[in-house]
Structures are given as structure tokens and as C-alpha cells.
Image (tube, coloured by chain):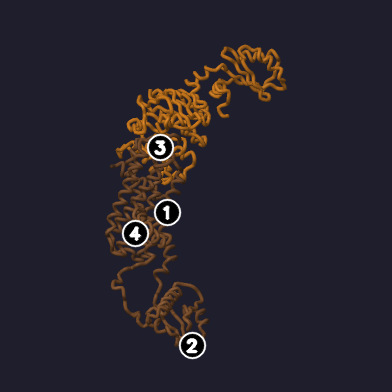
Chain colours: A brown, B orange
Amino acid sequence: MNSLIRNCIYLGKNAFRDRDFVFWTLAYPIIMAIFFNAAFSGMMNLNMDNIQIGMTSHNQIRYIFEEMDFFDIHLIDNGNYVDRLHNDEIHGYIDDDFNLIVSKSGVRQTIIKEVLEQIKQTIKLNRPISGNEFSVNYISNRNQKANSLFIIFYSLIAMVSTYGIFAGIETVSIIQANLSYVGIRMNVAPLKKINFLMAGTIVAFLLNILSNGMLLLFINFILKIELFEEYVYTLILIALGNLFGIALGVFIGSSNKKSFNVKTVMGIAITLFLSFLSGLMGPWIKAIIDKNAPIIGRINPISIITNNLYRINILGNKSSAIEGILILLLYSILLLFMSYVFLRRKSYDSL
Amino acid sequence: MIVKAKNVVKRYGEKIALDHFNMEVEEGEILGLLGPNGCGKTTAINCILSLLNFDKGEIEVFGRKMTSNSYDIKRQIGLVPQEVSVFENLTVRENIDYFCGLYIDDKNTRKKYVDEAIEFVDLKDYVKFYPKKLSGGLKRRLNIACGIAHKPKLIFLDEPTVAVDVQSRNFILEGIKKLNKEGSTIIYTTHYLEEAEMLCSRVIIMDNGKDIASGTTEELKSMITTSEKIVVSFINTGDEIIRELKKIPHVIDIDRNNDDFIIKFENGANNLTNLLNFISENNLTYTKLYSQQPSLNDVFLELTGKELRD
């Protein structure tokens, strides 16, 4: 036990004083969060009440747009809509033939176009537009926060959870004589590798949890995005994501004879690929996979975290959380066990 | 016998790194493994320490076959690897304490040992320094302290003075003698002849993975035909003098280097007197004249046909 604690203390000191490690573990996720927020926040913060539309007072569909709360109608009977478009006073102008004229593209212009298309189709079907009741709220429960940005942040949290992969590779390199000079000394010492692996896993886990904690606090208090409703399952999933990442890192570190750098690249590639499949680079990928190959979402560890974070916090559905937790736990145990088998009683063919 | 290696063969693919290598180490000695870079010294150590698999042969440490989980044997061994093998983000004291702690569980004993190791390598003023802030020589001292702090019975030092300044080198060599006096058996690899001569009670000369000779430095020197070298510098003398010099009793060979004549004698008495008589009889004038005992380099040269530092 003393040996375990001593290994934890010194490995922790060694890792925490490593500037590269601190940057990638603590700072990089926050930089990513800032980047994602800047890039995608438009999807969440769009104010739907301020779409300005210009049209003549005798436009036949004027009254339809006036029924919708998020459009403000500007009546322009003198034909001087071009200047008003260029001055951003209106986002779009609908002429009397129902053509949309815009001076630039954007989300608001797209919304006008979609609504206009819907109206045109309805007119072509000869259904009375007046039959539509636009003031009725068809969604009875508006508590759902369905939002693409949430999926991206859940994927980011899942990816950062699995960043333990690097600490795992580092831990193994310290006890492998063919990967580090310190490894030669460690292999000559009467050190039980299982003790060292446990210490390395505990330290990596704690540092990664710290990293996750900082990221979550940053998202919550600085970016002011409230991602979570259900904390118990959320924290268990994140914690197991950490354990899985470390276990995968230990496995990559111990299962092949590649150099430390190659193993690190393998770790990055695997993490990014799994994150890609889970929707980090855009929710549409996740949608395609969920539609065509749902099994990938069920076995991809990052998808397990992302999906379950989404389900339990957005949809209030905890039914698959237990399954996800068990799968992550199983992965972690299997990977750590196989790694130990690779590492124990090891002599090398060359150093 | 503390270490015994018998007919050990180690191959790296097609290349043979140890070719029926033999080594025996008695308790209390400083055994030098002497040979040029790449001759197999480090490979031999790594095989003995069971870091490396080997293809053939037998190795025993403390009378038993050593494996990677022979913890009781490992507990009695210290290693100072060729490369500085420490944690870059732990201080000098933390590094020594960490590696000592792999062997010594008791906190008080470990503290005492760590203090002694710091004293031993004279790093008292640097205990809070990180390795990257230390000079090459000080890093080597730290490397040694990490390997010996737990007071092992058997210490392997793999070229500990490579790339070290003269001051640190002398300090390290004196330290090794002290460790030996305190009871540790030392296996010391080097390609520096003078270190082996100065330090080792016995030397194994290695070349191309083979142990080509072993013994005390005196025993090794007695194996070769040259027993004495006399260097004499004549003024304005042609090569014809060489023919005359060869007539002096026991002369076996003469090399010329500008005005210097290096005259090699086989075992025999009065070589210097005979040469002085020759000079007097031939009215030769010399500017310098001195006698040299053969070095380990001469031994290596005669055994392998090449200089050790080739």
C-alpha cells in the first residue's frame, strides 16, 4: 500500500510538472470549448424574434407572415427595398410574385426561404392558407433543449474524457525498458508492474477528472451553457470515459513494439476517429450512423458517452445509461487485463 | 561466485552481439569489461540482468538463474545505466528517493540512505534542482546516486564517465573505489584503458561479442610478448639505425615516429642498460629517452590487431 501511495505521489508530481502534459490535459480542452462555442454558438443563440421582412402592403401572403411572431413586416410600397437590404434594415424582401430577394445569405434568410417555400407549396395544393393556425403551439412540453451545439459539447466532453489515453501510454512507457531510459532502471528494480500500473492509472484518472472538471466549470460558468440536468449518471459516464481512455492508452502502450511517438499518434488517431463517428465534427455524421449502422453508436465508447449524455440530459431517458456504463466498464477491465498480460514477466529481444 | 555467464550467445537478427561470452565475478572485486564501442559490453550486462533474452548459454546471479520476477535477487542489485535515466520533472532529491524507494520500504531507513547517497555524489547544493538544470557531470552523479542509494551488494556501472569533465570523472572513479571498499562488488564497463587500469582488480577484454582475455592487468600484460617499450629520440638519424638497434638483446620490434624510435623488448633483464651502451658505443646523440611498461592497449593491440580506440 505504501508503495502504491509513493508511486502515485511521484508519478503525479512528474506529470503535473510536465508543461506539455498540463497543456494538453488542462488547457487544450478549454481552448477547444472556446473554439466550438465561437464556431457554433450561432446555432443556439439565434434570436428568432427579429427576422425583418420587406414586402408591399398588397402582397397576398403578407397576412400569413404577420401571424408568425418571429417575423417583423416592413411595408415598402415605393420599391426602395434594395437600399434597405444593403443597410440591413430588412433580411429579405418578398415581391408580389412570391420571389425572395436577399443581399446576403444567412440563417435568417434561410428561414424566410423555407417558410416562403412552404407557403408556395400549400398554395399550389389549393389548400386554403387561412386554414393554418400559426398561433397554435403544437408542442405541449417545451422543456426539451434540443440543440446541435449540445451534441458537439457532449462529444467534446466525451473526447476529453478519453484523453487519459495519453497518460496511459506515458505510464506504460515508464516501465518498458525498450521505450524509455527510466524503463531500464524500473525493470532492474524489484518493482511489481501491477502496482505501478495501478498507481499510473489512479494518477491519470485523477488528473483527467481534474481536466474534465475544469472544462465543465468553464462551459457552465464562463460560456454559460447549462448542459446537464441529471448529474449522477453524467458523472458516472464521464468517470468511466476517463477509465476507458487510460485503459486504452495502457493497452496501446503495452501491446506493440512501436516507438512512444508512434503510439501517441495511434492514440490521437483512435480518439479523433471515435469522436468523429460520435458527431464531434458535425451532428450530421452521428445522424447518418444512427440511421444506417446504429450498432456503431452502441459500441463506440465515445458515442456511448455522447449519446447517453444527450439522452439523460436532453431527453430525460436513462434506459440505455446502465448498458453504456457496463459496456465502458467491461472495455476498461478487458483492456487493463490484456495489458497486464503483455507486460508481466517481460524480457526484450532488443533495447 | 556472484555472477556467472557461460557460453552466452545473443543475436540481433543476423548480427551476433555476444559470441559464446563467458564471465565470472567474485564477491568483492571490481571487474572491468573493457572493449571498444559496440563490442557487446552493454548487451552482456542486459542479458545478465535479464532485460534481454539471449539465444544460448547460462547465466547465474547470486548462484541462481535470474528472471524478470526474481525480486529477491533484484533487491541486491544496483544499476547505473549508460544513459542518464531519471525523471525530468522530479528534483534531484525526489529522483533519488523514488528509485531508492523501489528497494527500501522503511521511510526512516530510506531517508538516511538518500541523505548518504546525496553526500556520496556531492549533490547537497543541488537537491532541489531539476535534472535539466544540471550540467552533464552533475547529471551523471545523479544517475549514479539513483543506482546505488539502496546500498546494493552488486553494482553494474555501464560507462558512467562518458561525456563527463575531468573533475567529475575523477570524483566518480574515487566514489566507485569507495563503494567497493564498503563491500559492494562492481561490474564496470568502459572503453577507457586508463580507467580500467586504475580501477579494476580484474579485467575482461571484449571484442566482437567475445571475451578474448581476462585477468588482472598484470596478468593480461604478461600474456603478450612485449614486456617493455623504450622511447628514444635521436637527432638526424636515418632508418639504417633501425637495423643496428635490432641487434640489441631482446628487441622484438621498432616503430619510428619522426625522430622518436619506439623499441619493443620481450621479457629480459637490463634492456635500458643495453640500449644506453648501444648509444654510447655508436656515439649517438639523443634528446629524450624513457621506458614504458606495456599498457592494456598493447594487450588489446596484440590480441586483436587493432587499437582499442580505433
Q: Position of residue B139 (x, y in %)?
A: 46, 40
Label 3 crowd bin: few (<14), some (14–19), many (20+), radius 10 Å:
many
Q: Which residue is mark 2?
A: A77
Say which amino acid is labelled 2.
Asp
Q: Which residue is mark 3?
A: A185
**Which one is earlier in the sequence, the residue at label 3 or at label 1?**
3
Q: Earlier in the sequence, mark 4 or mark 3?
A: 3
- The residue under label 1 is A273
Residue B252 can be seen in this image:
yes
- Where A298 sits versus A228, above or below? above
For the residues labelled 4 and 1, the Cα–Cα distance comes to: 16 Å
- Tell me the chain of label 2: A
Looking at the image, tell me whether mark 3 or mark 2 is earlier in sequence order: 2
Q: Are marks 2 and 1 on the same chain?
A: yes
Distance between the Cα atoms at labels 3 and 2? 86 Å
Would you name the residue on which mark 4 appears? A307
The Cα–Cα distance between marks 4 and 3, rounded to whole angstroms, is 44 Å
Does label 2 or label 1 sit earlier along the sequence? Answer: 2
Task: Describe the element under mark 4 as helix, strand or loop.
Answer: helix
Tell me if I can see residue B114 in this picture: no
| Neighbours of disc 4 within 10 Å: few (<14), some (14-19), many (20+) | many
